[in-house]
Amino acid sequence: MSDFTVLGDVGETLKKLLEDDPWTGISPKPEITFKSPKEIKDDGGSPNKVSLFLYQILENPHLRNEEPQRIDDAHLRFPPIVLDLFYLVTPYSDDKTQEKFILGKVMQIFHDNMILSGSILQGSLSGTDEELRLISHPISLDDLTKIWSAFQEVAYRLSVSYLVTPVKIDSILQSGIQRVLSKEMNHAYMERRR
């Protein structure tokens, strides 16, 4: 079961995935943040950073028509809303070569952990049997330019996009059900058809 906090829990899962890596060969280890490229521009702190910016949320079109979930013999829960989360991953460093190394390391970590499940899941996802897919999501230069144009007064930086799916938010609506206990047959109708 996932509640409305799952949107934040997915971000925390990605952050933990990156923070748990030793980042061998990159010093200092990058600070992982959810700040947008505009917010991170004037941010102090570590000279090396990675921005995991959630820039779009869409309903998953393939999983829209899920069946209601059985709670018990007398109740059904309405189907969850199933979402696709899109993250813009942007490295920051004072050294442009180091910036490329940071991005390469993030892509390596995400590639090696394309299925998020078990102990890596955070928050409301922790201890569940949920399985999320972490997929590189190529976007055109035109779309990337549109995203970056939303961050006024911030110059474009090398970025990649990732999709996390399926992210479910359970419905709180329930409906009552009853088992069929008897069936009535209309014999008069059957005799007339003969």
Image (cartoon, rainbow, N blue to C red):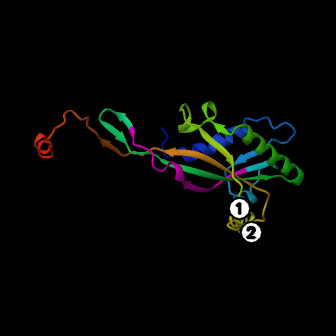
Instruction: Determine the CA span between mark 2 and mark 1.
Output: 8 Å
Q: Which mark is residue 38?
A: 1
- Give the image location of residue 187, x and y in percent: 12, 40
Which one is in front, 33 or 112? 112
Residue at x 80%, y 48% (from the top left corner): 103
Image position of 4 (left or right of 103) = left
Of the residues shown, which amino acid type is indicated by label 1? Lys
Of the residues shown, which amino acid type is indicated by label 2? Glu
- Give the image location of residue 57, x and y in percent: 57, 55
Please tell me whether mark 2 sits on a helix, a strand or a loop.
Answer: loop
Tell me if residue 48 is in the magenta stretch.
Answer: no
Question: Which residue carries the number 2 mark?
Answer: 153
Image position of 69 (left or right of 105) = left
Stretch in magenta: 51-69
- Is mark 2 in CB contact (under 8 Å) with mark 1? yes
Whether residue 95 can be seen here: no
Rate crowding at label 1 as few (under 14), some (14 to 19) or many (20 or more) other CA atoms within 10 Å: some
